[in-house]
Amino acid sequence: MTVRSLGALLLLAIVWGGSIPLTKLGLRDIPPLTLTALRYLTAAPCFLWLLRGRRLPPAGVCAAAAGLGLLGIGVGQVSQTLGVRLTPASVATVVSALIPVLVVALAAVRLRQPIGGTQVAGLAAALLGVALVAGGDPRALAPLHAATLRGVALVLLSSVAVALYYVLSVELIERYSVLTIAAISSLAGAAVLAPVAVWELGHAPMRLTASAIAAVLYLGLLVTVGGLWVWFGALMTLPARIPAALQYLQPIVGVLASAALFGDRLDRWFWTGTALVLAGIALSAGTRTRPTARPGVAVTRQPGINESSSA
């Protein structure tokens, strides 16, 4: 189980790493709120099909999962799409890289998963590496314009909302299934975004080009349906610091994708940052910590890992 989870997380880092460049690509032809809505409306039939024959949780649990969907999608994904539109892809990548740090911090508080000084140092090194990967030479940084600052604020809001969505969802997944909670929250987000997209299309044009359709399918099927399934499954199998650390590979993939799509250059700062990210992952994911259980939740042992939040 652990080997499969780690392999799936590495694949997920590649898939999620391409999300910001593909969002930039989709925004060339589709307005931001409509792009986010189309992403979740594309994912909705898949979630409905996966839910067939399953017994739904009680109404209160469904309402809680739907509320998390409004937080993670209605606030998190919408603010990210709006922020990416105003912010250079490199800056958005660095701010989005705060999500793993926030996940680990929230998991330490809410799920009582321990984290030591070595893991903190590893996450800090990885975050510094992300800044170098995405931003390049720190001496060449230019002052941020007002529009860019608004974009940074929106992406930061997105990072906080998405991290809360991830960690708070684990408590529901412990009692029900990854698929059920991910599906309900995503369907709730799609239902809220649909009328917003209709309103936006009355004020902004949309072109259904091949690249726009490809971006929507990528974001809806791979990033959302496949991504949430793998991510929540990993949070249930491994301590949060391991999935969080491995997600620092995302910016490396994102910058490589931007280089391929938009012709961005890869300099020595990229490779220096990549080395720091890999070193940070090794520090934060490879150190033993003493497991601590929440009241009423058992801590189980899995081969190849040091502690695990229970299912």
Image (cartoon, rainbow, N blue to C red):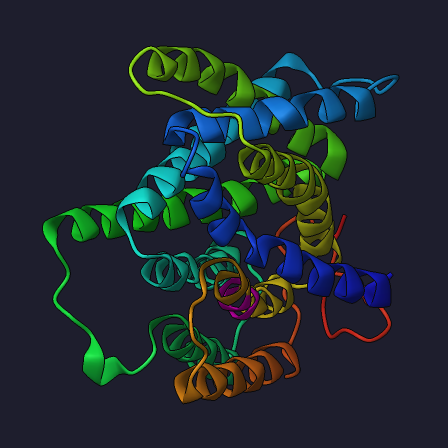
For the question of whether residue 70 can be seen, the reply is no
Specify whether 40 is left or right of 48. Answer: left
Q: Residue at x 75, y 34 (%)?
A: 179
Give the quadrant of residue 190: top right
Task: From the image, give the main secondary structure of the stretch colored magenta.
Answer: helix
For the question of whether residue 92 can be seen, the reply is yes
Specify whether 83 is left or right of 194. Answer: left
What span is colored magenta in the figure? 251-256
Q: Quadrant of the N terminus?
A: bottom right
- In reply to whether residue 215 is colored magenta, the answer given is no
Q: Residue at x 54, y 50 (%)?
A: 19
65 to 203, vertically: above or below: below
Q: State how many labels appear.
A: 0
Of the pair 188 and 145, the residue shown nearer to us: 145
Residue 120, image x, y percentages: 46, 77
Specify whether 288 is left or right of 151. Answer: right
Of the pair 298 and 234, the residue shown nearer to us: 234
Q: Residue at x 59, y 22 (%)?
A: 41
228 to 93, vertically: above or below: above
Residue 124, image x, y percentages: 41, 78
188 to 9, vertically: above or below: above
Residue 76, image x, y percentages: 42, 39
Give the quadrant of residue 74: top left
Of the pair 189 and 61, the residue shown nearer to us: 189
Of the pair 62 and 123, the residue shown nearer to us: 123
Q: Residue at x 15, y 61 (%)?
A: 144
Residue 253, image x, y percentages: 57, 66
